[in-house]
Amino acid sequence: MERVDVRMGISLALVSLVIGCARQATPAPTPVAHAEAEAPIPTMPRSSPGCVLRSMPSVRAPTLTWETVVPSTVSVADAQATIALHRPHLPGDPEALLATAAAYMDVYRSTQDQAALESGIQTYARLVHDFPNHETMDEVLWKLGWGLQQLRQFERARMVWHRLVQHHPGSPRVLMAYVEFGVYYLGEDDPLAASRFFLRARELGDSPQFATRADLEDEVAQEVEAALAYAGYAEVWSNFLANGSVEDPTPALDALRLELTSQPATHASTQVLEAINREWCSR
């Protein structure tokens, strides 16, 4: 059996676990979240008046999920065309593997097709196994962990993301992994741990290494923006739940609304503002 470069921190044993868990996945996976994903909310004009916030929400838990904040922008037809285009070049071409794995994940996000999810996970695992020093390994580890989360393979996902954090500390995917850690702990009814990860993501987003990252691709920049918007929203909820629902969250909500409305409107910021209005506004 080949030996994988241990400097990447991913062992063949881990890759075998990843491939094996995809083959033994439970049916009908659900996102790692405390609430069901809702349909996309129409964009609210930024000129809409703000509401009067209440100290108690109209719901018991956040209604917005990160999966709603970051929808897939690739059509199923385009994703399937990408898979067909690169199939003849597998498995020896890392670029073909990368494009194919991403396309499988796009199909899954649009259709919730379990077979597509499993194929995407196995393709990313093959990349880790065959090309451990590939220049996009941070993206590979991030998306591999995300796929495992969708299969509810939480421990394996965290193993992958711990290696992402350890070996690619400057990657924007680390910030997104922190948000996913927060989502996990909120789903496990540990809002205090969740709030720490959401705060860590926001602190990382404010750090110089991100403030000067003009080289980020548009897609990655959008994902980072969405992650930060959601982290702010989820941190308020986490702190509220961790404090026994007795501490007034309106100052934090007002600060978050001011932060989001002071920037150009995006899909993510609109989703978060709508969720705040829906959950915390006086009727």
Image: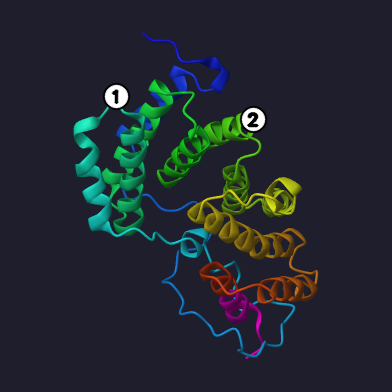
Earlier in the chain: of badge 2 and badge 1, it is 1
Q: Where is residue 212 shown, x and y percent of the image? A: 69, 50
The quarter of the picture where the N terminus appears is top left
Q: Residue at x 23, y 57 (%)?
A: 77
Q: Main secondary structure of the magenta part?
A: helix
Q: Amino acid at mark 2?
A: Gln
The x and y percentages for residue 267 are 51, 70
In the rendered structure, which segment of residues is drawn in magenta? 273-283
Q: From mark 2 to mark 1, how far is it between C-alphas?
A: 27 Å
Q: Residues within 10 Å of mark 2 (few under 14, many from 20)?
A: few
User: Residue pushed farthest front?
Assistant: 215
Q: Which corner quadrant holds the C terminus? A: bottom right
Q: Is residue 156 above or below residue 31?
A: above
- Position of residue 237 measured from the top left corner of the image (x, y, whole percent): 67, 64
Q: Secondary structure at mark 1?
A: loop
- The type of colouring in the image is rainbow
Among the 4 quarters of the image, the one containing residue 87: top left
Kindly identify the residue that appears in the image at 51 percent across and 23 percent down.
10
Which dot, 2 or 1, sits closer to the camera?
A: 1
Instruction: Name, please, the residue furthest toward the top.
Output: 1
Q: Which circle marks residue 166 in the picture? A: 2
Q: Residue type at mark 1? A: Gly
- Judging by the rendered image, the residue that carries numbered circle 1 is 92
Res 33 visible: no
Residue 203 in view in this figure: yes
Q: Which mark is residue 75?
A: none
In front: 96, or 242?
96
Residue 202, image x and y in percent?
A: 70, 54
Residue in the image at 65% along x and 79% along y:
280
